[in-house]
Amino acid sequence: MRLGIAFVISVFACGSAFAQNASSKATAAINSAVGCTLQTATTIGDTVPQQCHDIFTGAAVTVTADNFAEIMKSTIKVSNSQSLFVSPSLVTGLYTQTKVKTSPGTSSTAVAEGGVFLRAIVTNQATGDVQIGYPVAVCTADILGCHADVNGNYGVTLDTRVQTLTQDISTCVVSTRGTCTFDLSTDLILQTTSAHTFNFIFPNVGVGSYTVSIQAAVNAGASVAGLGTAVGAAAYGLGSLTVESVRLVHDFSF
C-alpha cells in the first residue's frame, strides 16, 4: 500500500491537548479526533458505505505532503546531554469487505486493504531543525513494520491488512439427462478495533525548547477483477502522548 492514493476521505472531530509548562521534565497530550479513509470498488452494483467527508475541504486540518496529519503535540525544554522518550498510544480500526460472484467457467477476485501509520517529529523552536524519532529514523524497505509513503518517508505500521477473496467455478458439463446452470456468491467481512503504544527515542537532542509532534496517516485500497465488490477502510481515534526528558548513560549510541 502507498499513502499517496488518489482518493482520500477523512473526518475529524475536535481534538484537545493539555497546556504545557516548557520547563517541565515531562509533559503530555491527548487526542479525541477521529480520522478515517475509505476506498470502494464494485462491478455488481452493490451499495457501498460512504461515512466520511474530504479532509481537505471538510475540516481545517493541516496535512503534510505525504498525507500525515498532526494529531497530538506538546512542548518541552531540555538541557545539555538530555534525550526525549516519546510514547504515543492510539486506538485504531480496520474494515475490509470482499464479495465475489461467479458463473460456471469464470473467476473473480476482490481485494480490500487498510492501514494506520504513525511517526514522531521533534522541532527545535529556535532553529527550526527537525528530527524524526528512532527507530523510524533508521527504517528501510527491508524492515518489517516500516512503511514508506510515495515520497520515500517512513512511518511505523500500527495496523495493516490486505484481504483477498478469489472464487473460481469450473465449466459445467451437461449430461444427456439434464442441465447444469448455477451462480455462486461469497461475501467476507472483517472488522477490528485495537489500541497500540509505540515508543520513539530522540537521543541527545541538545539544549533548547522543542515541539514534539505525533503524526498519523490512514490508507485504504480496493480493487475488483471479474464480478465483485471490495471495501477497504482504516481509522484512528482516542489517543494519548507522554514525553519525558531523560539523561542516557555516557556515550550512548544506537
Image (cartoon, rainbow, N blue to C red):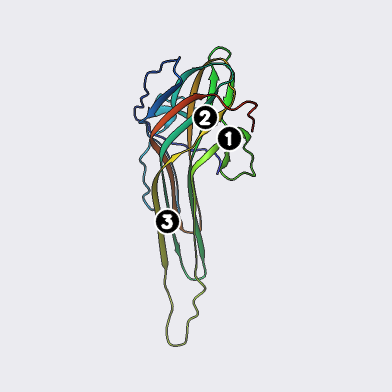
Q: Which quarter of the figure is the N terminus placed in?
A: top right
**Is any part of residue 220 visible from this angle?**
no
Which residue is outermost to the top? 126
Residue occupied by mark 2: 120
Q: CA distance from mark 1 to mark 3?
A: 42 Å
**Is any part of residue 155 visible from this angle?**
yes
- Residue 20 place in picture, x, y as percent: 40, 18
* Three-letter code, disc 1: Val
Residue drawn 58% across the image and 13% down it:
127
* Vertical position of residue 149 compared to residue 175: above or below: above
* Vertical position of residue 98 compared to residue 198: above or below: below
Residue occupied by mark 3: 44
Q: Do the CB atoms of the residues marked 1 and 2 lie less than 8 Å apart? A: yes
The reply, left or right, for residue 244 in relation to residue 153 is left
User: Callout 1: helix, strand or loop?
Assistant: helix
Q: Nearer the viewer, mark 1 or mark 3?
A: 1
Which of 112 and 108 lies nearest the eye of the viewer? Answer: 112
Disc number placed over residue 136 in the picture, else none: 1
* Three-letter code, disc 2: Ala
* Vertical position of residue 58 compared to residue 110: above or below: above
Residue drawn 41% across the image and 58% down it:
188
